[in-house]
Image: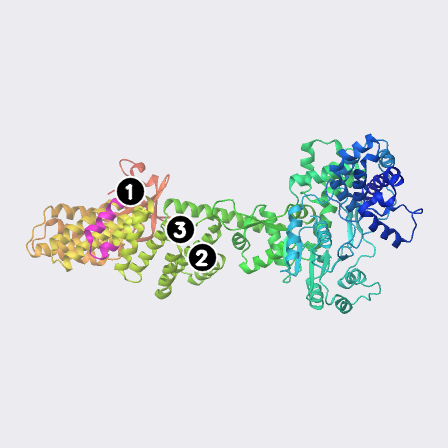
Amino acid sequence: MTRARLYVLMDAFERDVRAALVRFVVNEIGEEAALNACFERASVKRAQDGTSGDANPITEYLDMREAYDLLNTHRSLLPSEYASEVRDLTGHLDRLVAIRNRVMHARPLAAGDSDAAVSILTQFQTRYWSEMKRTLAQLVADPSWEPLVTVQSDAGLTLHNLPLPDYDETGLVGRAKEVADLVSLIKRGREPVLTITGEGGIGKTALALEVAYLIADDTSQPFDAVLWTSLKHEKLTANGVRDIAGAARDIVGALQPLGRALDDDFGGSSRELASALEGLRVLIVLDNLETVGGSDFATLYDGLPDTVSYLITSRVGVGEFERRYPLSPLSRADSLRLFNDFVRARRIAGLDRISSDARVQVVTKLRNSPLAIKWFALAVEAGNDPIQLIRHQDELLEFCVRSVYDSLEPSAREVLGALAVLGRPVSVDELVVLLQRSMDQINVGLQELMRGSLVRRENASSPGDLNLRVVLTETATQFLSRRVPPDDTVRRAVLRRETEYRATEERRASDLAERSLAPVVVRSRTDADAPTAQILRQALLAGKAGDLDKAFKQVELARKLNPDFWEVDRVEGYLRGQAGDLTTATACYRRAYEHADGEDRAVVAHFFAGYLARSARDVKSAIAYADEAHETLKKADTAVALGTYLVWAHRFSEGVALIEPASVIQTGKARLIAISSLAEAYRRWAEYARSEERNPLLQFRRAEKGLGIALAALESGVSDNRLRDTGADCAVEAVNGATQSITIGTSIANLSEWLDSLSRGLVRFVTARRWSQLLNEILKLSKTKGCPAAGKRLAELALTIDQQSTAPVSAEASGTGDASMIGEIVSIRENYGFIRHPAFPGNIFFHSDDVNDRDGFDALHTGALVHFRSTSSDRGPRAIAVARS
């Protein structure tokens, strides 16, 4: 029910109350006795009005509540059935009087006022309510009747020029908390500028008006005046967007309603307004301020007295002056209530009969927006198809979003476009990675989008993740999909980077699962760290490729994104160590160690130990950190690391005891590292026997052990250059130990068998770093008095292998024997493979058809030694006559 219809109904009831008071009480006992304590005040009012009792009964100067209470006081004078009714329904008067005052005094109606008033009044059934019953019957009979009434706002407690609200039919639905918050903030007075922000149609104006009326009627009178002005110059109707005639379009025009509320002769200048407001506590309400710039408001703010406070509504805010109060869409329950109340109040045929589920779908499709809900209902009332309205909301979206979108800076549009393509909540860090823009650029764009209510923040879903994510509002999503042509170039670029981002994250997770302590693996505390972790991984890869400048730039970006993340310092420490900047590297590792805790601190301790041992040459400190890491993590990697540093500190037994089990349980590259470390431990132990213990036999036995470990791995196909070099180093120490033992007359059991076994694997070391030294040691052994024949055969073989490694290869070589070469299979595929030989730096190809082995191609495996001859093909050298050696 509209305010005008409710006005005539309440007025009719009030006239019935006064008529009964005159008829049954005043006419019986006189005015003074009838009015009792109210008589003097009513008499003064009548005298001031300049009318006599005959012209205007004194009851006209009573409030409705006073008149009704007097009926109760004189119930003995009333007809019995009427007296009982007055008494029984007195409990409803508080609610009815409050509604009456809002209707009569031009205050915003509360939700449910119309229904409550009708419900209460229809309970008055006796024949003494003739005016009320007649009026109610007319209202029911003619739903389109809009009485011509003039509702004048009373001055109230505070001077104001507030307009009548446009939400009388439903009252302000679902904003009780927001109203209370804003009233409290305004009365507290700590922020002179409060701005209600939100997307178009969300209900900012209605909320501001409700708050302004409450401030104006506040009995504590926090302000001398509450002044309203609006820069809204268009409105959305059932038939589209329409201009508002005479609306202010700039800040100068907005000053007119403010000044004229104080002085009808107001000239219009801000200086004149400032003079009029001097010394007054004033709340100025500026509605729809996004139509002018923040700089215009700044000029107004600077020019008016400090005693002025401001309540602003704007889609984008005004900048540095304000405290923003973001307004969200209504809850689903409140949206349904608004829809139901509005449809019922306007008696919209068709919508009043749809199911509850259909109503939920409607308000959901309308994004729980008050303006959208009312626009939809009015458009249906005007004869539009509701299904088509839901499907095609172009004009609504234009009204709500276009002005904000058109004013966006390029950085904001880029972020907006990316969010539209991604279609999911995204963190600032992810946007930095996906858009390849600086954090400052992303933040500037996001701030503009937040001010324009085009994006909203969401809390992270995973526990412990404090990082906020941004996502498009539903209105922005609809606007972009329907009203903004997609940029295919931007869309493809964002999707490509998103795919790369996901693939990289999968690789990072896989690396972490397979070998969590590899240098290139970066950990994350929560999902929020993932973008930073990817950037740090790129930094490590750049460092590995030798591009330290790029690596440090990536670290700098990661630090801006996530300054308290310990991995940032850990990775920088690793890279600084690579660059030889030991002072900075040490400081970075210490910061990482301090920032991390629990298992993360143990991870830092592991890497810090590696840096201290290898770069800073501080083995003692390295052992302390490595021991802490292993005590917490108890991984094979930490065992190998701690064992290695113990070996370097000449604590060989302890070191080998840690490394040996790890070399068995590890797989893949980790196993290769463990095996190499174990062989290296025995080599160092052998070297210690030679240089410190002066025991060549012990030197031989320890080096023999290390060589056996290396050869076993190489023969099984587990190999890399480090293991090959370590095996060669062990061979050097073992041969040297054998030579020294023979020289001093110390017998070595099974020496000939060992020399023969070395012969079988010798070709594996021809590309090793210390091949020349190994060759020299073998030749020296062969010339030592007492050297067994196996040593001389070993020397001949070593010379042959060395000659093959340096002599050019004849493409026509054929046959067997001296023309044959010995190499190592380094790779086997389905029907082909590659052989390592020093004459072929890039390895030499062979096909399964080229295999002469009695057990065929399937008998070959990575690490196997083979005889072969070489020939040429259109694709380069090719091995033929391949057979196991």
User: Which amino acid is tagged 2?
Assistant: Asp
Q: Please say if 83 is above or below 111.
A: above
Residue on which the image places disc 2? 564
| Callouts 3 and 1 close, C-beta under 8 Å | no
Give the class, few, some or many, for how many residues have Cα within 10 Å of label 1's Cα (few <14, many ≥20): few
Q: Secondary structure at mark 2?
A: loop
Can you say which quadrant of the picture contains the C terminus?
Answer: top left
Majority secondary structure in the magenta region: helix
Q: CA distance from mark 3 to mark 1?
A: 21 Å
Mark 2: give few (<14), some (14-19) or many (20+) Cα within 10 Å: some
Residue 220 drawn at (x, y percent): 69, 56
Q: Disc 1 residue type? A: Ile
For badge 3, the amino acid type reads: Val
Residue 616 spot, x, y in % from top left: 30, 63
Which image quarter holds the N terminus? top right
Of callouts 3 and 1, which one flags the residue occurring earlier in the amino acid sequence? 3
Label 3 CA crowd tier, 10 Å (few <14, some 14–19, many 20+): many
Residue at 41% x, 45% y: name it: 510
Q: Is residue 661 magenta?
A: yes
In the rendered image, residue 144, in percent from the top left (x then y), is placed at: 85, 38
Disc count in the image?
3
* The magenta segment: 645-664
**Which residue is denoted by mark 3 in the rendering?**
521
- Left or right: 686 with respect to 868? left
Locate residue 117 relative to residue 56 in the image: left or right: left
Q: Earlier in the sequence, mark 1 or mark 2?
A: 2
Residue labelled with disc 1? 665
